[in-house]
Amino acid sequence: MRLPVSFFLLSPTPAIPSNWPFLSEKQYKTQLKKWNFDTKYVKASEYMAMIKLKRERERGNPPKDTRFILRGRPVDPKDITRFEKRQIKKGKLHIEDDEDQGWISLTP
């Protein structure tokens, strides 16, 4: 379904037309989440996946520099580093590599 440009320009929650498939504002917002229009910021799980991939590539031989593009926009490496430092400070992420902590990842 293609949405008209004016649909997004009027307001965050425009008046819903009578022929629109959604009956309520809640249905409208739920559908926006399904279409991934609610993803303005990088989520913690996405940062964690980036950090994991970045560490794997840094361990490689030779180490590789990694740049990320998320939803069509580049992610600033400074933001990833800042998130990583915050998570280490909170104790949710460790400085050591995952292999050193005894984690084992198996594919079912």
Image: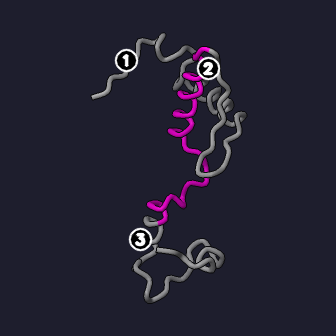
Tell me the element at label 1: loop
Q: Amino acid at mark 3?
A: Gln
60 drawn magenta: yes
Pointer 1 with pointer 3, Cβ within 8 A = no
Mark drawn on residue 104:
1
Quick check: 101 left or right of 64? Answer: left
Q: Is residue 3 above or below residue 91?
A: below
Residue 65, x across and y down, in percent? 68, 26
Picture quarter containing residue 78? top right
Q: CA distance from mark 1 to mark 3?
A: 41 Å
Q: Which residue is mark 2?
A: 58
Check residue 27 in the rendering and tell me which mark sits there, or answer none.
3
Q: Is residue 73 found inside the magenta-colored segment of the image? A: no
Q: What amino acid does circle 1 point to? A: Ile
Marks 3 and 2, how far apart in space?
A: 44 Å
Cα gap from disc 1 to disc 2, whole angstroms: 19 Å
Task: Estimate how packed mark 2 is, as few (under 14), some (14 to 19) or many (20 or more) residues with alpha carbons within 10 Å.
Answer: some
Q: Along the horizontal axis of the image, is 47 left or right of 80?
A: left
In magenta, the rendered stretch is: 32-61
For this orientation, the residue located farthest to the bottom is 18
Nearest-to-viewer mark from 3 and 2: 2
